[in-house]
Amino acid sequence: LLQNVEFPSIIITLITALIGVFLLATSGEGFLLVRMVFYERILFLIAAFLTIFPGVKTDLAGIVCILVAGTTHFIRAKAVKRTIVPA
């Protein structure tokens, strides 16, 4: 199974698969820093499946989904944390 594969490609595949599993768990849970809205969950779910399967095209498409959903999520999380007043 791993006879004709170079070491760097194994590492890249392993890292992207781990990222995909993490995204699958967060989209299933619906929470990362704050509760996710519907479109963030969908984008993270799509990104999870794209990064779990090996391939340069799927990894790049997954990264685009991660950037879009991650950026909106972090901006929303920052806004939510500003409105919370410590007791």
Image (spheres, grey):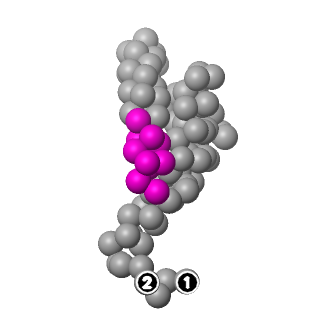
Residue 61 colored in magenta in the image: yes
Q: In the rendered image, which residue does mark 1 sit on?
A: 1
Residue at image location 55% in from the left, 55% down from the top: 52
- Quadrant (top left, top right, bottom left, bottom right) of the N terminus: bottom right
Give the main secondary structure, helix, strand or loop, of the magenta stretch: helix
Q: Position of residue 81 (x, y in %)?
A: 42, 20
Q: Position of residue 35 (x, y in %)?
A: 58, 27
Q: Do we see residue 22 in this rendering? A: no
Q: Position of residue 51 (x, y in %)?
A: 50, 51
Residue at image location 66% in from the left, 40% down from the top: 28
Locate residue 68: give its quadrant.
top left
Residue at image location 38% in from the left, 64% down from the top: 12
Say which amino acid is labelled 2: Asn
Range of the magenta residues?
A: 55-64
Q: Do we see residue 14 in this rendering? A: yes
Local secondary structure at mark 2:
loop
| Residue sitting at the far right | 28
Say which amino acid is labelled 1: Leu
| Residue sitting at the far bottom | 3
Q: In the rendered image, which residue does mark 2 sit on?
A: 4
Locate residue 8: give its quadrant.
bottom left
Give the CA separation, mark 1 to mark 2. 8 Å
Residue at image location 55% in from the left, 27% down from the top: 40
Vertically, is 64 above or below 17?
A: above
| Marks 1,2: beta carbons within 8 A | no
Crowdedness near tag 1: few (<14), some (14–19) or many (≥20) residues, C-alpha within 10 Å: few
| Residue sitting at the far top | 83
| Residue sitting at the far left | 8
